[in-house]
Amino acid sequence: MKTEEVSWDDPAATALRARQRTEIAERYGTPDSEPGTPPSAEDIAVFLVARTEDGTAVGCGGLRDLGAGIGEVKRMYVAPDQRGAGVATAVLAALEEWARSRGWTRLRLETGLAQPDAVRFYTRSGYRRIPNFGSYEGLSTSLCYERELTPSPAPAAP
């Protein structure tokens, strides 16, 4: 599997995000459960798609720049038949590495009460619960998390 940076309007990225929004709508019982400002091409700094060896797009995720070296993870999604295969871990690791390479020091995210699988994944990945931030403040159905990014190790001297 490989992850690749794509444009926001890349067909595979668009299809994966549509599947993510459909699943979220089913979990929350509403067609629009977006508690904050929806991500867009204008505010997403990077968007990645994970592909299997045969080129099938199976996962995605992006980062929104919140300023002051902080990014927000947006639209993480893995196709149901690929869950448990390391796709989410690969996408999140690639997002974290992209953020580190730009000097970002923390990543934040929002998930919800109807996503216990996401809570387990982010907690296992080193994210800790924080007070709700930004447009998620005061929303009892939102759960916010953050991880401090350690700098990438310096390359070994020749």
Image: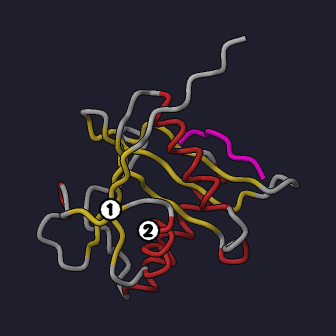
**Nearer to the camera, 105 or 140:** 105
Residue 79's label in the rendered image is: none
Q: Where is residue 54 in the image (x, y as percent from the top left)?
A: 88, 55
Residue at image mark 2:
123
| Side of 12 where 8 appears, left or right | left
- How crowded pointer 1 is (Cα within 10 Å; few <14, some 14-19, many 20+) is rated as many
Pinpoint residue 43: horizontal percent, then vertical percent: 36, 40
Q: Which residue corresponds to the image point at 61% horizontal and 59% vertical from the top-left?
A: 89
As shown in the figure, which amino acid type bears the numbered disc 1?
Tyr
Residue 10 lies, with reference to residue 117, above or below; the image says above
CA separation, marks 1 and 2?
Answer: 8 Å
Q: Are marks 1 and 2 in contact (CB under 8 Å)?
A: yes
Rendered position, 91 above or below 142: above
- Dot 1 or dot 2: first in sequence order is 2
Amino acid found under the numbered disc labelled 2: Thr
3 on left or right of 95: right
Question: Going 53% across and 45% down the picture, which residue do you hit?
Answer: 95
* Magenta region: 1-9
Q: Which of 44 and 137 is in front in this view?
A: 137
Quadrant where the C terminus sits is top right
Nearest to the observer: residue 49 or residue 124: 124
- Residue 6 magenta: yes
Q: Which residue is drawn at 27% across and 55% down?
A: 37
Which residue matches tag 1? 145
Please indicate whether residue 26 sits to the left or right of residue 7 in the image: left
Label 1 secondary element: strand
The crowding category of the residue bearing disc 2, from other C-alpha atoms within 10 Å (few below 14, some 14 to 19, many at least 20), is some
Q: How many marks?
A: 2
Residue 25: give x, y in percent of width and height: 42, 80
Residue at horizontal 29 percent and vertical 66 percent from the top: 129
